[in-house]
Structures are given as structure tokens and as C-alpha cells.
Image (cartoon, helix red, strand yellow):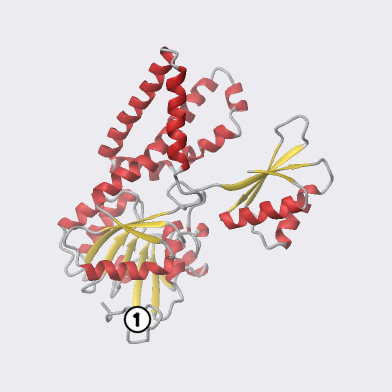
């Protein structure tokens, strides 16, 4: 490594840090933005697509970019693998064949950890160290265009070093990740996959299965699609996630997910039995239990399933009212990320759905609109 460092705010030309990011999309680009421009830090982007490397540089996300894995990795102190889960092991293999800088740290951002961690642990990395990583944040958007300096702020960032990983290397990676303003959590790779499988992978499968079930009903009665708005659309929004990405994630975490599916089937069987026996008290108890646990979950904490920061505003049928609301928000420097007109009730000309990227923006918007006497709902 290019010198020992304990304070990332003090670098000079003789003590530079090179960070190579393979796959500068939403996560990789957000990491790059956190590191780029810091004193003594050089951020390099890699893509197999030349047009993508040009885009990374043009958007100012990296200092320079290349289609050569060897050039990106040469003399790098940190290598972040931000490629799809299904390609992580391929990239680790490729890096293991390169003359990496002694003491460099290789890490990844995949949402499953056991497979890649186990694979890297079997390889000879010639003085490099692999530490699994998973920033638990995301966005409805994808690609480098969606990268944000604030994406990882206040999110959990999980590290999964194997037993025997030198503590000083884990500390160095943690130190670098301070620039993301994420909360670092260390755990075993297998435990990570079990927990993330339950709180993210299983919900995605349930959402997909539910939407596909309703889509099947809709084939013989189009009222299903017409009426499946509002809450149904919101609770199943993750069913629209990238099919290829989720194919790789679920196959990578297959054993964990299979057990979770069986447990879920058991929960559904329990509900079915309660209904068959007309056990109203038992049904109430299921809702009470879930309500008690859900009330203990942290609100507005960034996680794997992107939070929705939105409110609804009933608007009168006045010319220019939508533009007026948008203008009011803009003048107050409140960043509105999306606006949708919903005509949901006969006695109300229209309802606006206003979406924001951050909870703080939502809070400010609600306060402003209420002060202007608008009827606001969350």
C-alpha cells in the first residue's frame, strides 16, 4: 500500500491512493463520487464498453476510465467490483492472474456474499486481500446517470471478512468507506446471506409471484388490472426489478432462498387453516404480531428495498394549479423527483402524487404545502 494512513484528509503527491472501480453504475458511480476529488485520491473506472468509459469521464464521475482490466488494476490500492453478482467470481479470477500491488484490497458490492467470499478465499491473490462488501442502498433508477454522492449516506454497509483477514486491512477499508457516510457493520458472509435473503430476496419473489398471479386472473377479467392501483401497485413495486440482476442474485443465494420459500409456504398454510376453521381470533393475532414487530422497525432508514418518500395532495380544478405547486416547491429549494396526477375519486377533481429522493425533502414539502392550506396526505 502507498504508505500507512490514518487520516484521509492529508495526502501528497508521494502518498497517493488509487481506487479502481469495475462497473461504474448506480453503486459504483456513487462510490466514485464519494472518493473523487479527495486530496491525493485517483479514481479510475472500468468497463468493457468503450462508450461507457467515455460517459463516466464526461459525467465527471471518475478521473479517467479504461476498457483494460490490467490498466485499471495496475498499482491500485483499492479495487471495487461493482459488476453483476453473476460475474463477480469471473472478475476475481481475472484479478488473481494480474500482478496486483502488494497489500491492495479487493472488495465487491454484491448483495450475496458467501459464494464470492468462499471463491476468493480459495485463490492465491499474491499479496492482495479480498474483503466482501455490501452497501445496502439502492434506487428506483439504475446506471451511472442515477449515481449520487448521497446514495450511501446513513445506509448500512456490510463487510464480511473471513476469519484470518488481517485487522489492519479491514480497518483501512472501513477508513476509506467513511467518505460514504454509511454505517459499517461486520458479519459472517453466510449469516449475511441468510438475513438479506429474508428481508430482501424473499420479498422480491413474493411480489413477483403476487403480480403474476393477478396477471393470470386478468387474462379472463380485465377489471383486475383496472382496479389494481394505489396500494397494490405500491406494495408490489419491487416486482419490476431487473430480471437478469435478480436471476443472478437468487441463483447465488439458492439454498438460503429455498428454505425461506418453504418457511413462507408454512406461513400461508397457517393462514389457510385459520380461514378454514373460521378462527377470527387467530387471524387477529397474526395481524397483532406483525403490527408489533413492524412498529419496532426503524423508519426512513436506507435499506436494500428503496424507501418511498412521497405524499398526496388533493388539488382543486383550477387552471395552472399543478404548475403553481411545482413552482412553490422550487422556490423553496425543495427537490421534487416525480409528479403524477391521480384521478381517484369522483368528488375530487384530482390528486397529485409527489415523490422525493430524501425524507428531509418530503418533510419540508409537507410543511410548506400545509402552510399554503393544501390538503396533504402521506
Q: Quadrant of the C terminus?
A: top right
Location of residue 167 (image quadrant) = bottom left
Q: Position of residue 218 (x, y in %)?
A: 54, 22
In the picture shown, does residue 353 fall above or below 274?
below
The local crowd at label 1, few if under 14, some if 14 to 19, many if 20 or more residues have their Cα within 10 Å, is some
Which residue does the image show at 71% across and 62% down from the upper left? 332
Q: Which residue is mark 1?
A: 16
* Most foreground residue, 101 or 174: 174
Q: Quadrant of the N terminus?
A: bottom left
In the picture shown, does residue 30 fall above or below 37?
above
Relative horizontal placement of residue 35, taking residue 359 as reference (left or right)? left
Q: Position of residue 226 (x, y in %)?
A: 62, 27
Q: Position of residue 278 (x, y in %)?
A: 45, 13
Q: Position of residue 343 (x, y in %)?
A: 72, 35
In the picture shown, does residue 84 fall above or below 48?
above
Relative horizontal placement of residue 16, taking residue 217 as reference (left or right)? left
Residue sitting at the far right: 319
Location of residue 46 (image quadrant) = bottom left
Q: Secondary structure at mark 1?
A: loop
Which residue does the image show at 21% across and 63% down from the upper left? 96
Amino acid at each position: 500500500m502507498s504508505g500507512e494512513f490514518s487520516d484521509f484528509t492529508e495526502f501528497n503527491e508521494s502518498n497517493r491512493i488509487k481506487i479502481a472501480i469495475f462497473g461504474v453504475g448506480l453503486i459504483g458511480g456513487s462510490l466514485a463520487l464519494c472518493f473523487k476529488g479527495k486530496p491525493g485520491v485517483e479514481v479510475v473506472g472500468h468497463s468493457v464498453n468503450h462508450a461507457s468509459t467515455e460517459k463516466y469521464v464526461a459525467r465527471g464521475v471518475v478521473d479517467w476510465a479504461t476498457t483494460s482490466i490490467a490498466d485499471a488494476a495496475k498499482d491500485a490500492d483499492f479495487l471495487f467490483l461493482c459488476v453483476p453478482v453473476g460475474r463477480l467470481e469471473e472478475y476475481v479470477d481475472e484479478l488473481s492472474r494480474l500482478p496486483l500491488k502488494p497489500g491492495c484490497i479487493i472488495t465487491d458490492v454484491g448483495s450475496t456474499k458467501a459464494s464470492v467470499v468462499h471463491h476468493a478465499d480459495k485463490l492465491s491473490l499474491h499479496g492482495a486481500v479480498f474483503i466482501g462488501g455490501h452497501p445496502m442502498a439502492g434506487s428506483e433508477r439504475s446506471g451511472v446517470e442515477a449515481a449520487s454522492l448521497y446514495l450511501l449516506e446513513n445506509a448500512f454497509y456490510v463487510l464480511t471478512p473471513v476469519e484470518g483477514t488481517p485487522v489492519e486491512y479491514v480497518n483501512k477499508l472501513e477508513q476509506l468507506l467513511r467518505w460514504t457516510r454509511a454505517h459499517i457493520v461486520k458479519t459472517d458472509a453466510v449469516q449475511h446471506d441468510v438475513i438479506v435473503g429474508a428481508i430482501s430476496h424473499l420479498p422480491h419473489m413474493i411480489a413477483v409471484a403476487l403480480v403474476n398471479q393477478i396477471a393470470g386472473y386478468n387474462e379472463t377479467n380485465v377489471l383486475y388490472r383496472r382496479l389494481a392501483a394505489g396500494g397494490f401497485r405500491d406494495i408490489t413495486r419491487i416486482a419490476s426489478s431487473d430480471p437478469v440482476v435478480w436471476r443472478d442474485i437468487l441463483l447465488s443465494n439458492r439454498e438460503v432462498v429455498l428454505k425461506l420459500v418453504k418457511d413462507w409456504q408454512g406461513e400461508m398454510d397457517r393462514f389457510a387453516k385459520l380461514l378454514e376453521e373460521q378462527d377470527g381470533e387467530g387471524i387477529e393475532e397474526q395481524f397483532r404480531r406483525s403490527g408489533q414487530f413492524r412498529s419496532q422497525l426503524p423508519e426512513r432508514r436506507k435499506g436494500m428495498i428503496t424507501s418511498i418518500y412521497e405524499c398526496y395532495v388533493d388539488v382543486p380544478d383550477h387552471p395552472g394549479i399543478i404548475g403553481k405547486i411545482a413552482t412553490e416547491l422550487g422556490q423553496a429549494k425543495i427537490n421534487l423527483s416525480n409528479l403524477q396526477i391521480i384521478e381517484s375519486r369522483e368528488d375530487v377533481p384530482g390528486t397529485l402524487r409527489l415523490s422525493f429522493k430524501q425524507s428531509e425533502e418530503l418533510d419540508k414539502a409537507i410543511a410548506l404545502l400545509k402552510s399554503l392550506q393544501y390538503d396533504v396526505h402521506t
